[in-house]
Structure formats: C-alpha cells, structure tokens
Amino acid sequence: MSIIVDTSYVYGLYYPHDAHHQQSMAFADVNTEQILLPAVVLPELSFLFRRDLGYAGIAQFLKQFKDIDARIEPMLNADLGRIYEISEQYASAEFDVVDCCIMAMAERLKITKIATYDRRDFGIYRPRHSDYFELLP
C-alpha cells in the first residue's frame, strides 16, 4: 500500500522549528508504507524552506530527502481535467491548486491515505474511489 504526502507533512518532518516536527518524526519512524511525493509539492517546499531558512535551507532539505525511499509522482495531463472539476465543485472551500492535484492523483492511483496537517481541505473533500481520505499522522 502507498501513502501520499502533502507539503505540510514533509515540511514538518524536515523543519525542526515547525509545530508538527515531533509528530512528523514519530510517524516517519513507524510508517511502513511506500511514500509518494507528488512532484507539485517540491516547488511549495522550496518556497517554504527558502522563506524560513534561506537558500541553505533548500540545500539541506534536498540533501536529507534524497536518501529516503520515496517515489516522486508526476502530475499527468490527464489529471488536469479532474483538478479543474475538483476546484469547481469545491469552489466555496477555495482549495489551492496543489491540494487539488494531490486529490486527483490519489483518485487516479486509488490511494486513500494522505499524510497532511491540512485537515480542513482533505477532510472536506469526498474522493470518487472511497468515502473519505484517511488523514495521517
């Protein structure tokens, strides 16, 4: 089985001053499922690390992240239609584009588990392939 990771979880894992750092580390220690990192998350992480730690923060993140067993999942052209549908259907919730991408990828890959601290958006959303997403940690 696989789990998709969102920006908030990965940032919490690699930024020691994040409020979720300890919780992220504890989850990473016990998780045995394949980690899928949506490629669209990397620019968002880059922005956050540069904002909070400068360019050296990006380099430090990449140095640590390259050694974990994660699969980078690309966004496909076929996902774009579903991303648009999700953004339209949930317009009043104002999901950001990265979250819509993760939701569409999870549906395409039939994944029901997402590591995120964005409980609002992923908690509101009802995927096509299951009743809800299991939000971890």
Image: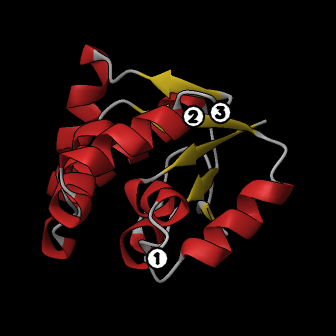
**Sequence order check, earlier mark of 1 and 2:** 2
Q: Is residue 39 above or below residue 78?
A: below
Q: Secondary structure at mark 3?
A: loop
Amino acid type at circle 2 is: Leu
- Considering every residue shown, the one lying at the far front of the view is 56
Which residue has dot 2 on it? 36
Q: CA distance from mark 3 to mark 1?
A: 25 Å
> Which residue has dot 3 on it?
68
Q: Residue at x 31, y 38 (%)?
A: 42
Q: Which mark is residue 90?
A: none
Q: Disc 1 vs disc 2: Cβ atoms closer than 8 Å?
A: no
Q: CA distance from mark 1 to mark 2?
A: 19 Å
Q: Are marks 3 and 1 in contact (CB under 8 Å)?
A: no
Task: Depth check: give the residue in front, 49 or 60.
Answer: 60
Q: Nearer the viewer, residue 30 or 4?
A: 30
Relative to the observer, which residue lies in front, 112 or 41? 41
Q: Give the residue drawn at x 27%, y 46%.
A: 56
Nearer-N-terminus badge (2/3): 2
Residue 129 sits in quarter: top right
Label 2 Cα crowd, 10 Å radius (few <14 / some 14-19 / many 20+): many
Residue 74 image offset from top left, x and y in percent: 38, 21
Drawn side of residue 93 relative to residue 99, left or right: left
Badge 3 or badge 1: first in the primary sequence: 3
Query: Which mark's residue is nearer the viewer, 1 or 2?
Result: 2
**Residue designated by label 1:** 119
Judge depth for marks 3 and 1 and give the one in front: 3
Residue shown at the point (25%, 61%) measured from the top left: 53
Task: Determine crowd level at label 1: few under 14, some 14-19, many 20+ residues with C-alpha closer than 10 A.
Answer: few
**Kind of residue at badge 3:** Ile
Q: Position of residue 101 (x, y in %)?
A: 31, 41
Q: Is residue 92 above or below residue 85?
A: below
SS at badge 1? helix
